[in-house]
Image (cartoon, grey):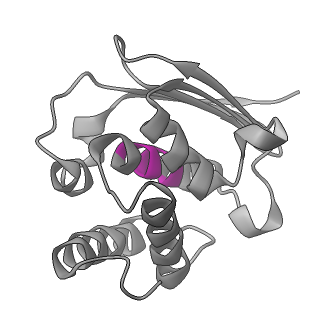
Amino acid sequence: MDKILNSEENEILSDYLKRIALNYKISINFLELLNLIKAAKALHWNNLNIGLALGIRTAITTMYKLQLNRNDKEFKKAEVWGSFCFAQGVEVITGCYHLRNQLIFHRSIKRNSILKVWGKDKMIKIILKPKEYKNYKDAFNCEDSEIFKSIEINELS
């Protein structure tokens, strides 16, 4: 998978992942995240786009906010309202797959993308702002406050 990313993509993603490492305490390291993103690009017809980038970013934010460990299968279920590409970004980061009935997908391109994830003891709901992005670089480079309209976390009983 070494040749999956071109030099520009590698630079954009490295900058983004360095920001993640500085600001988020998550249970997955830089190289693992980079390999997941490479896999997402490879499975997505060797293409990075806005929807995929937003799905990846939203899922990483979920991992951080709920302190879930992808490798220990702590993501129980996800529900996505958005584009196919957004859902694929969520799938690759969370490990919740539609084919395993762990991801419920609602195709929606006329409203804000929404992600709900159930973890071991909490559920999170993230609603994205309606924002126009020029390209995937724009989606990876902007601040979380520019992307997320609301983030709600609830305890599961």
For the view shown, which residue lies furthest in the left direction? 134
| Residue positioned 39% across, 47% down in the render | 52
In this view, the residue in front, 60 or 120, is 60
For the view shown, which residue lies furthest in the bottom direction? 2
Q: Position of residue 106 (x, y in %)?
A: 58, 19
For the view shown, which residue lies furthest in the front direction? 45
59 in magenta? yes
Q: Position of residue 28 (x, y in %)?
A: 60, 73
Residue range highlighted in magenta: 54-60
In this view, the residue in front, 50 or 3, is 3
| Residue positioned 45% across, 75% down in the render | 34
- The number of discs equals 0
Q: Quadrant of residue 100?
A: top right
Say above or below: 157 vs 18.
above
| Residue positioned 36% across, 12% down in the render | 111
Q: Is residue 88 left or right of residue 112?
A: right
Q: Position of residue 46 (x, y in %)?
A: 38, 63
| Residue positioned 28% across, 43% down in the render | 50
Q: Quadrant of residue 152?
A: top right
What secondary structure prevails in the magenta region? helix
Q: Position of residue 63 (x, y in %)?
A: 59, 54
Say above or below: 85 vs 108.
below
